Image (spheres, rainbow, N blue to C red):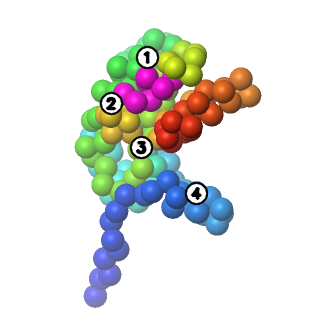
């Protein structure tokens, strides 16, 4: 006899609770539909569309040339392959240089299927993070 578990999307409150409970989560990077399907089918909790696609997919020498449009495209492709994992998309280089630019890029990513955005930086990014969070952008 086999037992089937319910397959459903993660929610932000559930992720927060998992963190508080000390649960380890699995996160992988994917750039295409096929890999998204494999990751999702194997219980990956979060899938990231990273700006590393510039080097891995586009053959560039760095992530700097990766555009919001590049991330939007891959976000849409990967989103179609997920039924359970939460999709997190990178804000590429300088797309978060100002709070307003970060909001514009984040909205485009959410419209493409991202459920959360990720940015890189330390204390100098707190204003951007606060700005996005105040506008209900999961970051």
The residue positioned 56% from the left and 38% from the top of the image is 133
| One can see residue 56 in this view | no
Q: Residues within 10 Å of mark 4 (few under 14, many from 20)?
A: few
Q: What element carries label 3?
A: loop
- Highlighted magenta segment, given as a residue range: 102-108
Q: Which of marks 3 and 2 is nearer the N terminus?
A: 2
Q: Is mark 4 on a helix, strand or loop?
A: helix
Q: How crowded is mark 3: few (under 14 residues within 10 Å), some or many (20 or more)?
A: many
Q: Residues within 10 Å of mark 1 (few under 14, many from 20)?
A: many
Q: Please give the residue where the numbered disc 4 appears in the rendered image.
A: 16
Q: Which of marks 4 and 2 is nearer the N terminus?
A: 4
Residue 97 shown left or right of residue 6 in the figure:
right
Tell me if residue 10 is in the magenta stretch. no
- The residues bearing labels 3 and 4 have C-alpha atoms spaced at a distance of 14 Å
Q: Earlier in the sequence, mark 2 or mark 1?
A: 1
Q: Please give the residue where the numbered disc 1 appears in the rendered image.
A: 66
The residue positioned 40% from the left and 30% from the top of the image is 107
Q: Please give the residue where the numbered disc 3 appears in the rendered image.
A: 115
Q: Which mark is residue 105?
A: none
Which one is closest to the eye, mark 1 or mark 3?
3
Q: Do the residues labelled 4 and 2 touch (CB within 8 Å)?
A: no
Pick the quarter of the image with the C terminus.
top right
- The residues bearing labels 2 and 1 have C-alpha atoms spaced at a distance of 11 Å
């Amino acid at each position: 006899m086999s037992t089937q578990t319910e397959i459903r999307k993660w929610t932000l409150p559930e992720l927060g609770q998992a963190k508080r409970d000390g649960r380890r989560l699995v996160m992988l990077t994917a750039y295409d539909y096929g890999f998204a399907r494999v990751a999702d089918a194997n219980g990956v909790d979060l899938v990231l569309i990273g700006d590393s696609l510039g080097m891995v997919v586009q053959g560039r020498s760095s992530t700097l040339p990766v555009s919001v449009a590049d991330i939007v495209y891959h976000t849409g492709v990967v989103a179609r392959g997920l039924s359970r994992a939460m999709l997190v998309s990178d804000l590429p280089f300088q797309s978060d240089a100002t709070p307003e630019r970060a909001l514009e890029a984040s909205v485009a990513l959410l419209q493409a299927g991202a459920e959360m955005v990720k940015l890189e930086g330390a204390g100098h990014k707190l204003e951007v993070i606060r700005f996005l969070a105040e506008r209900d952008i999961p970051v």
